[in-house]
Image (cartoon, rainbow, N blue to C red):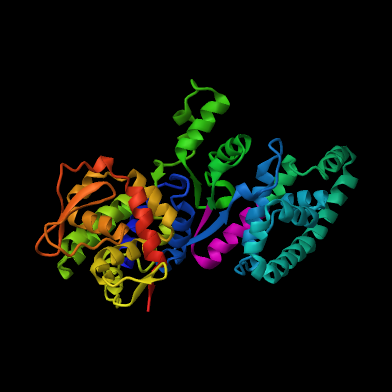
């Protein structure tokens, strides 16, 4: 799809992000529609990359039991993602004394970081494998900074305890919790650490720090609602968790609703619960946004081509496929996918020399008469990318629409059996449909044809088999 058309879809999402005080967003769309792909493309776009600094995490990859606290792994995942990007100025970090005390007593930061790297999922580690040296280098700098400051601050704290024996109770309390990952104090240490790192990046890059939590509706219900409860609460300064300017939860809101009612009961108010998370309204990502752009592209391109039947056929097929999610976001973002390029590609296939064509080991002398259906079929295969997807789509299309494209429908029927009738006024049958040849080398349907009786899927199976198996020399 042309970049200028993609920008229209980007602009719609940016308008939503720019709503005043819209700092927590539910980004909702059906499974497989391309939510993750869209968000990656959006934040990688030059315009938005200069404005936002996204951190993507995907809890569905975590190896964690339903009774364990997913929040622990989220924190280490965020830390892992931050350290994989060489943007932190460690010399400018400033940790509070309380944070350092907690970190010192837990004394498990490095061990927990390594353990968490295993638990947050192989895909996370593999995605960052090329930057593993940078992660280790930045981790070393971070530990050096923590160690340098914490030893000094702990010594001062130890002196305070010695001067005031009654403070020994504090020492005992810390010792009790130091090995317990998930305790309030250990949580607070990592949370403050992340807050400092995020603010450091924000100051150095001048970008809006944005956390994207993907596939929320594909994890255990206990973890879904733990995440929602955590991120729906502001900290004491009114900021998002960890200091992110924006937090985006990616899911299908209808799935979350069904899970919620299954978990808490049908009579429990879901929207009273969920609206505490998002600041403005749920952002509904759907392919109809692209459909509008595609329709605009169609109007811009239609004057360049004379074959109205071909243009109307592609408009019908691809508009319906986009609306019903048979064309993915990845395909839509392809530079090839524009109405202009669809027609150009069809013309490329039409210009193939079909005079020496072989099918099933025999030469097809009249194959040039199938030039139009062949080029249409090749174009469909090229842009859908998978025959099974096209056949699934053909199975659900509104067949009545094809009545208005009868000329193309007839050409497909003839192509499906490689049938050529050269003698005028000949009555014959294709796929059970009675047809007649006329004086101009064209064909027409002779009886009261009802398209509902035609098995379009079988017709297109035959068409695609021929299209893929013919040999053009």
Q: Is residue 4 above or below residue 234?
A: below
| Residue 37 seen | yes
Could you tell me which residue is drawn at 42 percent across and 63 percent down?
Answer: 48
Of 333 and 394, which appears nearest the observer?
Answer: 394
Percent coordinates x, y for residue 273 in the rendering: 49, 31
Percent coordinates x, y for residue 250 in the rendering: 49, 47
Please check the rendered image and state whether residue 149 is part of the magenta-colored stretch, yes or no.
no
Percent coordinates x, y for residue 61 in the rendering: 64, 50
Count how many numbered circles sit on residues in the image: 0
Q: Is residue 319 above or below residue 420?
A: above
By secondary structure, the bulk of the magenta-drawn segment is best described as helix
Left/right of residue 96 with respect to residue 53 in the rendered view: right
Left/right of residue 339 with respect to residue 232 in the rendered view: left
Query: In what quadrant of the picture does the N terminus appear?
Result: bottom left
Could you tell me which residue is drawn at 74 percent across and 46 percent down?
Answer: 186
User: Quadrant of the rendered structure where residue 341 is?
Assistant: bottom left
Name, please, the residue furthest toward the top.
Answer: 267
Left/right of residue 125 with respect to residue 241 in the rendered view: right
Could you tell me which residue is drawn at 31 percent across and 58 percent down?
Answer: 417
In magenta, the rendered stretch is 192-211
Of 122 and 360, which appears nearest the observer?
Answer: 360
Name, please, the residue furthest toward the left.
Answer: 439
Percent coordinates x, y for residue 267 in the rendering: 48, 20
Query: In what quadrant of the picture does the C terminus appear?
Result: bottom left
| Residue 14 seen | no
Please check the rendered image and state whether residue 204 is part of the magenta-colored stretch, yes or no.
yes
User: Quadrant of the rendered structure where residue 441 is?
Assistant: bottom left
Could you tell me which residue is drawn at 38 percent across and 59 percent down?
Answer: 464
């Amino acid at each position: 799809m042309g970049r200028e058309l993609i920008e229209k879809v980007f602009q719609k999402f940016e308008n939503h992000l720019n709503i005043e005080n819209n700092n927590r967003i539910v980004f909702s769309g059906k499974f497989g529609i391309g939510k993750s792909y869209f968000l990656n493309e959006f934040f990688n776009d030059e315009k938005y990359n200069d404005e936002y600094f996204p951190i993507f995490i995907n809890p569905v990859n975590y190896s964690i039991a339903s009774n364990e606290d997913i929040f622990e792994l989220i924190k280490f995942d965020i830390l892992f993602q931050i350290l994989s990007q060489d943007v932190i100025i460690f010399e400018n970090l400033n940790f509070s004394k309380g944070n350092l005390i907690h970190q010192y007593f837990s004394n498990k930061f490095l061990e927990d970081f390594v353990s968490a790297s295993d638990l947050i999922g192989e895909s996370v580690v593999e995605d960052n494998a090329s930057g593993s040296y940078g992660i280790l280098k930045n981790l070393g700098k971070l530990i050096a900074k923590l160690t340098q400051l914490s030893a000094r601050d702990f010594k001062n704290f130890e002196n305070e305890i010695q001067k005031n024996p009654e403070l020994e109770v504090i020492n005992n309390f810390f010792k009790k919790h130091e090995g317990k990952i998930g305790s309030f104090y250990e949580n607070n240490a990592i949370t403050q650490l992340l807050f400092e790192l995020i603010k450091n990046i924000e100051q150095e890059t001048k970008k809006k720090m944005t956390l994207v939590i993907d596939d929320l509706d594909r994890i255990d219900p206990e973890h879904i609602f733990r995440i929602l409860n955590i991120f729906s609460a502001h900290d004491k300064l009114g900021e998002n968790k960890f200091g992110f300017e924006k937090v985006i939860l990616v899911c299908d809101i209808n799935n979350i609703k069904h899970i919620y009612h299954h978990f808490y009961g049908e009579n429990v108010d879901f929207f009273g619960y969920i609206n505490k998370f998002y600041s403005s309204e749920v952002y509904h990502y759907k392919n109809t946004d692209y459909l509008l752009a595609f329709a605009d592209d169609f109007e811009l391109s239609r004057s360049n081509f004379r074959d109205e039947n071909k243009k109307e056929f592609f408009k019908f097929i691809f508009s319906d496929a986009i609306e019903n999610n048979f064309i993915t976001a990845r395909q839509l973002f392809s530079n090839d996918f524009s109405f202009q390029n669809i027609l150009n590609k069809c013309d490329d296939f039409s210009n193939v020399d079909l005079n020496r064509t072989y099918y099933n080991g025999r030469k097809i002398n009249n194959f040039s008469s199938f030039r139009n259906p062949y080029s249409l079929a090749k174009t469909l295969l090229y842009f859908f990318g998978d025959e099974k997807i096209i056949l699934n789509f053909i199975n659900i299309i509104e067949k009545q629409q094809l009545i208005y494209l009868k000329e193309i429908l007839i050409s497909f029927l003839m192509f499906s059996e490689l049938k050529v009738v050269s003698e005028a006024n000949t009555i014959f049958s294709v796929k059970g449909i009675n047809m007649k040849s006329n004086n101009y080398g064209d064909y027409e349907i002779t009886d009261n044809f009802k398209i509902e009786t035609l098995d379009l899927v079988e017709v297109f199976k035959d068409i695609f088999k021929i299209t893929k198996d013919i040999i053009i020399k």
